[in-house]
Image (cartoon, grey):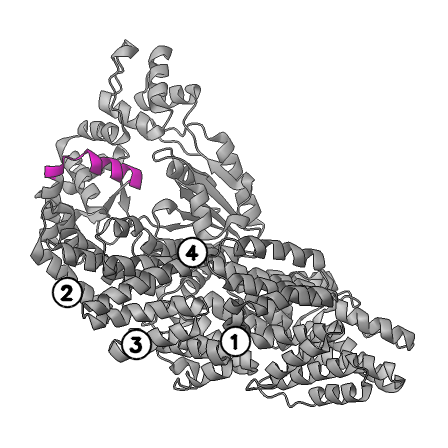
């Protein structure tokens, strides 16, 4: 361990032990994440820097640079990280052309690539400093990358003032154990003595040290500041120690102890709030000695050199910057901002002008507003919003200030920056009553998922805008209102507001949102086939659908799936999920993946369903809303139930119930009921199926939802009615399904399945067998609904057995058992097996019987499935958002667990299980 004279590292033995243990695990391909938290100046960065120095050359350090973070600029920190590593071109090659808007998936994937390539020379120490000041989008992207680690040799250390909030914002709560959460507190009395005597190179009385420890609470930055302020000469009488009462005063006192030239450099760095080159500092300070003066600051650990082509200086950390900035007198601070503005170009110049403005400035506001308009036209919503927010601070016209605030919030919500937008909720609440304020509050309601509240505000904003004749504004609000009304299941109201928006809007983004809402409204009123006709104008190839029609593309995928075109739905939804969500919509990339999960499930592609569920959960943890987790846990419950894991299914349902309780509208209650019924159907309790679904579909508020999602829940409700003897209600369900307009094989199959169930319940076994055979004979247009056909085949075998046709029963029950065995649908396989045992038929080999599937984790199963399809490790890594090393690690586990010698043997085994 190297020590610098007068700068010995003090204390933190337990914290260093945790880091060393985590590093040893990372070297063994067990990646770890350690959270280092503590107040400003507590020594978080110093601890990590000391650990990195102690590790020597064993760990390659990758650091998310403090450039500094800009929390209102999405992906600012990740972009700088990738630029430092030269990873920008790689990210563009992987995730599309440079004109594509960044997303959590794409930037997270680029971080995965960066960490993967950094491991080529050895284990990696990845440091994210000042995470509490990092923009939320970068936090989400880094969190997404950490969730996808497997066998990576990476130790990630995250420094933050707010551990719980940072972990939550990154979505890595389950990834960081309590033992890896390091909270730095102040030095003990003995550590304070060591610190002070090391810095001053002489002993001090215990009384003086005790007084200093009490004042500073052992905070190293407070201690450093106090020592600087008094030059290390502590007064003899502790009562005479008049120390600054705040950190900013302490740092100010300390900085004033420096030579005037050094203090000027520190203050200018604090005003610039960014690293600055020596030439720029020389220009701003009118000095040709900045380089020499800066060397003294670096020697005194007041500043740090930044590796760059031009000598560049930065402050030690953000706490120091904040304290220095607060210690500068306001008039001097304004003069420094104006000096910086005169030397810098926009947009940095504008930030300094706004910071220096004590009175309103109409010309600056107009300049900012023009810049915002240019950026908005270029598709740069984040920059446009930043300029509008700045304009809202300096414009002398109060109405324009409010317009700019509302426009900025609108850009942030429509650009998917929901968390950033919600930071301005208090400012919006303080603004004057009127349509702009109501619209902003409505948009923030959409961002929070409070759709009933959002509708109330947006309706009021629409009425007021229309009353004063501002039809452009009214059209925009109407398109936003259509989102809330569609989410609430109000189909006719959504149609009306969407048509209104289309009559008065010329902006393509507004029209695109209104057209998507219009299609959804028609689907609520007339079913998915009607909604599908209203997105017929979209290009058939998803990649050719314009960005402003992304919401409509997702709806097209949803409508395709709900009308039976399962493969078409997956094509649209997969393409949309890889885009950035550009619309003001309750749907998102997570929702697109969620709808695709159901399609894969019905097609019998349960590996793909689980894979999409895994990716969707990772995304939801980093950038999701409560509604995302509600839907995903619902699918977890269904998959567990169909696998026969009823305890796990009901545990997932408890999570769904808890999420549903926070909703402010009826939709989640309906979907909860259908999920509960599906779990009970897998358990074979048809009375509970009826008890859950019947009240939900009979509630008037759920009429449109029940119509739209009929193909998901009505077949099992109809079959449950038949099996509980209520054939009258079963026939009513059958008539509703027969009236649906199919766009694939799913609807014809479920119609015949229900017909057979009704005939069997009425004792007409021949009619039941004919209906089941007709269902099995349906041509698999739009994808073969494997699950429903297997259920139909099971029921056909059961009917033939009751009719005395043992040969036919044996054939169909065996076929159904093979499908259920391949899927891992144990409850259904066991029912077939019970009947076949009576016919003395050997059981079909299942994944569990073969000792293969039960040994694998979900992620290992995903990788094995893709290997069987002939995919390379790099292709698998791209599909699952993993590093290649992680894929190799999981594949090695698959081989070892099952004594498999290579890819060919694994491929043969996986393919034999599908026959």
Marked residue nearer the N-terminal end (4 or 2): 4
Disc nearest the viewer among 4 and 1: 1
Q: Secondary structure at mark 4?
A: helix
Residue nearer the viewer, 207 or 486:
486
Callout 4: 10 Å neighbours few (<14), some, many (20+)? many
Region rendered in magenta: 316-332
Does label 2 or label 1 sit earlier along the sequence?
A: 2
User: At which x and y percent is residue 78?
Assistant: 36, 57
| Residue 587 visible here | no
Tell me what residue is drawn at x 71 percent, y 60 percent: 645
The question of residue 330 being in magenta is answered with yes
Viewer-closest of 287 and 803:
803
Report which residue position mark 3 lands on.
Answer: 500
Identify the residue position indicated by label 2 in the image.
370
Q: Secondary structure at mark 3?
A: helix
Image x and y of residue 524, in percent? 47, 76
Image location (x, y in percent) of residue 156 = 47, 48
Residue named by callout 4:
140
Above or below: residue 742 compared with residue 665: below
- Which comes before the other along the chain, label 1 or label 3? 3
Q: Earlier in the sequence, mark 4 or mark 1?
A: 4
Which one is closest to the eye, mark 2 or mark 1?
1
**Separation of disc 4 and disc 2 at Cα?**
31 Å
Examine the residues drawn in magenta and state their main secondary structure.
helix
Q: Which residue is mark 1?
A: 708
- Do the residues bearing badges 4 and 1 touch, measured as CB atoms within 8 Å? no
Quick one: quadrant of the N terminus? top left
Give whichever of discs 4 and 3 has the lower sequence position: 4
Q: Where on the picture, by quarter, is residue 158? A: top left
């Amino acid at each position: 361990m190297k020590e610098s004279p007068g700068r010995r590292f003090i204390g933190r033995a337990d914290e260093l032990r945790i880091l060393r243990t985590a590093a040893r695990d990372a070297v063994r391909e067990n990646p770890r994440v350690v959270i280092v938290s503590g107040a400003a100046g507590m020594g978080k960065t110093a601890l990590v820097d000391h650990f990195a120095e102690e590790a020597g050359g064993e760990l390659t350090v990758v650091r998310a640079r403090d450039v500094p973070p800009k929390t209102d600029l999405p992906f600012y920190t990740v972009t700088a990280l990738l630029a430092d590593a030269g990873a920008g071109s790689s990210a563009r090659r992987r995730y599309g052309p440079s004109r594509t808007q960044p997303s959590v998936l794409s930037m997270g994937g680029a971080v995965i690539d960066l960490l993967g390539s950094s491991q080529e020379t050895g284990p990696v120490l990845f440091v994210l400093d000042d995470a509490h000041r990092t923009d939320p989008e970068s936090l989400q992207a880094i969190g997404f990358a950490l969730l996808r680690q497997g066998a990576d040799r990476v130790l990630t250390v995250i420094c933050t003032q707010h551990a719980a909030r940072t972990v939550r914002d990154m979505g890595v709560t389950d990834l960081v154990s309590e033992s890896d959460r390091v909270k730095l507190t102040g030095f003990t009395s003995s550590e304070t003595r060591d610190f002070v005597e090391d810095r001053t190179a002489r002993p001090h009385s215990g009384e003086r040290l005790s007084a200093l420890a009490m004042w500073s609470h052992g905070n190293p930055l407070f201690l450093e500041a106090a020592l600087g302020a008094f030059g290390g000469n502590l007064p003899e009488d502790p009562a005479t120690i008049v120390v600054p009462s705040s950190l900013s005063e302490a740092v100010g006192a300390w900085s004033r102890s420096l030579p005037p030239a050094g203090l000027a450099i520190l203050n200018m760095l604090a005003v610039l709030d960014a690293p600055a080159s020596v030439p720029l500092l020389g220009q701003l300070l009118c000095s040709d000695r900045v380089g020499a003066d800066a060397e003294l600051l670096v020697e005194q650990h007041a500043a740090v050199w930044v590796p760059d082509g031009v000598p560049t200086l930065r402050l030690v950390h953000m706490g120091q910057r904040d304290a220095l900035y607060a210690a500068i007198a306001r008039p001097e601070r304004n003069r420094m901002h104006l000096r910086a503005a005169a030397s810098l170009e926009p947009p940095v110049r504008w930030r300094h002008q706004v910071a220096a403005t004590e009175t309103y400035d109409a010309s600056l506001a107009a300049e900012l507003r023009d810049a915002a308009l240019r950026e908005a036209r270029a598709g740069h919503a984040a920059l446009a919003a930043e300029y509008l927010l700045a304009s809202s601070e300096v414009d002398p016209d109060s109405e324009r200030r409010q317009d700019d605030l509302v426009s900025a919030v609108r850009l942030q919500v429509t650009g998917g920056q929901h968390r950033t937008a919600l930071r301005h909720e208090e400012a919006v609440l303080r603004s004057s009553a009127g349509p702009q304020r109501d619209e902003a509050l409505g948009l923030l309601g959409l961002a929070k998922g409070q759709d009933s509240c959002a509708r109330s505000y947006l309706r009021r904003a629409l009425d007021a805008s229309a009353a004063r004749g501002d039809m452009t504004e009214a059209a925009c609000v109407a398109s936003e209102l259509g989102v809330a009304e569609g989410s609430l299941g109000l189909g006719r109201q959504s149609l009306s507001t969407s048509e209104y928006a289309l009559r008065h809007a010329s902006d393509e983004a507004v029209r695109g949102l209104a057209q998507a809402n219009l299609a959804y409204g028609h689907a609520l009123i007339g079913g998915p086939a009607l909604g599908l006709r209203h997105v017929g104008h979209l290009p058939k190839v998803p990649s050719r659908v314009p960005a402003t029609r992304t919401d409509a593309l997702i709806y097209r995928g949803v409508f395709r799936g709900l009308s039976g075109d399962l493969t078409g739905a997956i094509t649209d939804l997969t393409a949309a999920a890889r885009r950035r969500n550009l619309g003001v919509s309750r749907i998102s990339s997570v929702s697109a993946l969620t709808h695709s999960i159901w399609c894969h499930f019905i097609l019998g592609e349960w590996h793909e369903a689980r894979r999409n569920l895994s990716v969707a959960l990772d995304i939801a943890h980093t950038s999701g809303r409560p509604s995302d987790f509600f839907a995903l846990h619902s699918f977890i419950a269904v998959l567990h139930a169909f696998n026969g894991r009823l305890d796990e299914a009901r545990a997932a349902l408890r999570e769904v119930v808890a999420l549903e309780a926070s909703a402010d509208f009826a939709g989640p209650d309906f979907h909860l009921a259908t999920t509960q019924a599906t779990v009970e159907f897998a358990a074979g309790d048809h009375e509970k199926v009826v008890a859950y679904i019947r009240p939900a579909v009979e509630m008037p508020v759920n009429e449109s939802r029940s119509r739209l999602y009929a193909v998901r829940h009505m077949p099992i409700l109809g079959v449950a009615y038949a099996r509980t003897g209520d054939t009258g209600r079963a026939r009513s369900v059958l008539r509703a399904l027969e009236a649906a307009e199919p766009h694939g094989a799913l609807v014809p199959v479920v119609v015949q399945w229900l017909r057979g169930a009704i005939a069997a319940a009425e004792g007409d076994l021949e009619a039941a067998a004919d209906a089941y055979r007709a269902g099995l004979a349906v041509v698999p247009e739009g994808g073969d609904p494997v699950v429903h056909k297997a259920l139909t085949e099971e029921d056909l075998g059961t009917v033939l057995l009751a009719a005395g046709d043992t040969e036919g029963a044996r054939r169909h029950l065996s076929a159904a058992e093979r499908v259920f065995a391949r899927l891992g649908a144990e409850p259904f396989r066991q029912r077939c097996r019970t009947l076949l045992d009576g016919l003395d038929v050997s059981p079909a080999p299942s994944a569990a019987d073969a000792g293969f599937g039960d040994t694998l984790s979900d992620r290992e199963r995903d990788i094995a499935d893709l290997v069987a399809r002939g995919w390379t490790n790099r292709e698998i890594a791209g599909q699952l958002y993993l590093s290649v090393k992680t894929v190799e690690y999981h594949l090695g586990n698959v081989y070892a667990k099952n004594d498999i010698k290579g890819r060919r043997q694994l491929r043969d085994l996986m393919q034999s299980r599908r026959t």
